[in-house]
């Protein structure tokens, strides 16, 4: 690899240095320390024996400075494999660029480069396999479920009023349609988790966005559910507040919290969105007056497929993965999220804190 210095390559050909990275440093350090002594001895042998003390001091000082400069330069050159390893990791994380580190060196840093190369190749293959599995699940499972739900609706629409056992068939079709829709919801949540597991945000993806814009987008997909339960969504924040976020990802965060708030709220209550901002951070709260939860379960709510999931106040199904993804996205914004409740039927509050 061209980014490796010739110093490291050459020293790696010496039999007694080949398998030891520290030995390379110690050898250079030993030579560097003794250059002044060697230079002085050479001067004594080939030079004028009648020299002053000042000349001796100047010779030793000059030789020491030269030796120090050469030694430091060689030390820096020996760090080239570590610099290459760091760059390889950074390029893969930020650019998804697969590196080409050398795997033939046998000292400690050579083994490190070999393991980094192997790990990245393995990880890259796993990500590609995961994409293939996600595509397979999406096509081979989600499409039939959608078709099954559609067939149920078509059967219900084509049924005559005088059809024998009409009510029984209608109930069966309704149950089948509901079951397929629940499975579609679970499959969508699974696929989303599958795709979000390697989520990573970079500074280039973050932008200043008015919080009100994100709230409006988040409310779009759950506004009908709120109206059906007579739930009002109240805003309590300065319209001028902006957040430095990935707009799509953070919209998903608020949408999930608001959807949950409506799902677990009783009819004709209120869900509140509050926000405050300082120079250092932005705090966002989603508060409801719903079923709440046991305070000891607060942290487990954010687990993948949490064991403490509950049904909505009207029997709405939950997948147990939404808050897991929400927490993951918030943490990718260098933020944190916490859940609070005083207990059963005492409502809940979810607090997000992100850098301003």
Image: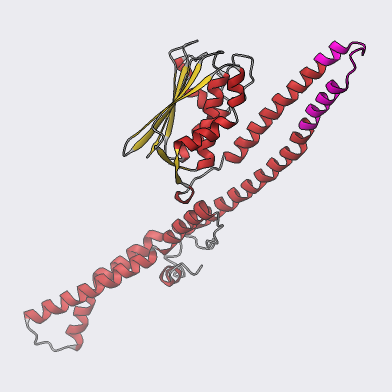
What is the count of numbered marks?
A: 0
Q: Observer-nearest residue: 298 or 246?
A: 246
Can residue 302 be seen here? The reply is yes
Q: Is residue 21 above or below residue 40?
A: above
Q: Which residue is depicted at the point 59% across and 27% down?
A: 222
- Residue 89 in the image: state x and y as whole percent: 48, 54
Magenta stretch, main secondary structure class: helix
- Residue 194 in the image: state x and y as whole percent: 62, 38
Can residue 325 be seen here? The reply is no
Q: Is residue 313 above or below residue 194?
A: above
Residue 39: name its quadrant.
bottom left
Q: Which residue is depicted at the point 62% across and 36% down?
A: 192
Q: Which residue is depicted at the point 42% across and 40% down?
A: 243
Q: Is residue 320 left or right of residue 72?
A: right
- Does 286 lie within the magenta span? no
- Residue 91 in the image: state x and y as whole percent: 50, 56
Q: Observer-nearest residue: 218 or 114?
A: 218
- Does 160 lie within the magenta span? yes
- Residue 122 in the image: state x and y as whole percent: 60, 50
What quarter of the picture does the C terminus occupy? top left
Q: Observer-nearest residue: 15 or 186?
A: 186
Residue 48: name its quadrant.
bottom left
Q: Which residues are magenta?
A: 146-171
Q: Observer-nearest residue: 319 or 250?
A: 250
Q: Is residue 168 left or right of residue 287?
A: right
């Amino acid at each position: 690899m061209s980014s490796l210095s010739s110093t490291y390559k050459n020293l790696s050909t010496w039999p007694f240095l080949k398998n030891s990275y520290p030995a390379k440093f110690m050898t250079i350090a030993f030579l560097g320390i003794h250059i002044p002594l060697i230079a002085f001895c050479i001067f004594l042998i080939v030079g004028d024996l009648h020299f002053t003390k000042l000349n001796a001091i100047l010779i030793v000082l000059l030789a020491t400075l030269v030796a120090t400069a050469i030694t430091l330069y060689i030390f820096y050159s020996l760090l080239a494999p570590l610099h290459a390893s760091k760059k390889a990791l950074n390029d893969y994380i930020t650019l998804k660029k697969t590196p080409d580190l050398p795997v033939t060196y046998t000292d400690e840093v050579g083994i490190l480069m070999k393991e980094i190369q192997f790990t990245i190749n393995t990880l890259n293959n796993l990500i590609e396999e995961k994409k293939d599995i996600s595509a397979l699940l999406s096509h081979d499972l989600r499409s039939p479920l959608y078709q099954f739900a559609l067939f149920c609706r078509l059967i219900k629409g084509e049924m005559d009023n005088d059809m024998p056992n009409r009510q029984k068939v209608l109930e069966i079709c309704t149950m089948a349609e509901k079951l397929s829709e629940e499975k579609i919801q679970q499959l969508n949540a699974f696929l989303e988790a599958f795709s979000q597991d390697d989520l990573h945000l970079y500074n280039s993806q973050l932008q200043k966005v008015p919080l009100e814009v994100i709230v409006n987008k988040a409310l779009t997909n759950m506004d009908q559910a709120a109206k059906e339960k007579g739930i009002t969504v109240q805003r309590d924040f300065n319209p001028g507040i902006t957040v430095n976020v990935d707009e799509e990802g953070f919209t998903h965060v608020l949408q999930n919290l608001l959807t949950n708030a409506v799902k677990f709220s009783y009819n004709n209550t209120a869900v509140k969105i509050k926000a405050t901002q300082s120079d250092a951070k932005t705090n966002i709260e989603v508060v409801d007056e719903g079923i709440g939860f046991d305070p000891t379960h607060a942290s487990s709510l954010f687990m993948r497929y949490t064991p403490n999931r509950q049904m909505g106040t009207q029997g709405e199904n939950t997948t147990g993965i939404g808050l897991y993804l929400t927490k993951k996205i918030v943490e990718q914004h260098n933020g944190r999220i916490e859940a609070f409740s005083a207990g059963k039927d005492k409502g809940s509050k979810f607090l997000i804190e992100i850098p301003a």
